[in-house]
Amino acid sequence: MARPSAPARDALMNAAERLIAQHGIAQVSSRRIAEEAGNTNHSAVAYHFGSRDGLLQKMVERQISELEPRRAAMIDALGDDGEIIDYVRATVMPMTESLGALSQPSWRARFIRQALADPAIGRLFDEDPCSARACAGSPVSCTRD
């Protein structure tokens, strides 16, 4: 079986990002995403991501993976002397830097706003916060039940 291509996956994620930013999560179908990405196979989302939810999860993971190296570096630089405001900066600044570095126009911030407002998708941003590197060494308690 052929391995799904990265450019095709990126095209689907970028198309979904734009469509969701413009119309909302509930109004955008997998078929519409595939068409917008220039894919004639209407099951392209299922082929590349398993499902529409799989696509949305990969989109969230893409954003988080872009932020984590910067967050980790900021937290590592704090050592044991960081104040709570420093940890807040380490959480917020990578997001603003990431969004600011995108080419314009960018639909990413609008997609994130839509995703965070949706209970099913928003949970993906913090599904397992204790596994995030940002929790390591922070004064915020990460406990598991």
Image: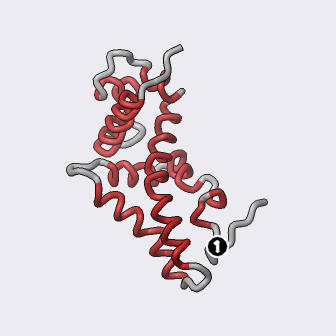
Q: Note whether 7 is above or below 24 in the view shown.
A: above
Instruction: Pick the residue in front: 81 or 85.
Output: 81
Quadrant in the picture for the N terminus: top right
Quadrant in the picture for the C terminus: bottom right
Which residue sits at x=44%, y=53%? 66
Which residue sits at x=35%, y=25%? 34
Q: Position of residue 140 (x, y in %)?
A: 63, 74
Q: Note whether 130 is above or below 55 in the view shown.
A: below
Instruction: Pick the residue in front: 129 or 21.
Output: 129
Which residue sits at x=36%, y=30%? 7
Q: Position of residue 69 (x, y in %)?
A: 48, 59
Q: State the residue lying farthest toward the right.
A: 145
Instruction: Pick the residue in front: 129 or 28.
Output: 129
Is residue 117 visible from the viewing direction of this image? no
- Which residue is labeled 1 in the image? 137
Q: Position of residue 127 (x, y in %)?
A: 61, 52
**Residue 61 located left or right of residue 143:** left
Circle 1 SS class: loop
Q: Count how many numbered circles sit on residues in the image.
A: 1
**Residue 54 located left or right of residue 17:** right
Q: State the residue lying farthest toward the left.
A: 104
**Residue 74 located left or right of residue 20:** right
Q: Image quadrant of residue 79?
A: bottom right
- Type of residue at label 1? Gly
Which residue sits at x=36%, y=48%? 111
How is this picture coloured?
A: secondary structure
Is residue 23 visible from the viewing direction of this image? yes
Instruction: Pick the residue in front: 68 or 46.
Output: 68
Q: Note whether 48 is above or below 112 in the view shown.
A: above
Q: Residues within 10 Å of mark 1 (few under 14, many from 20)?
A: some
Q: Position of residue 10 (x, y in %)?
A: 37, 35
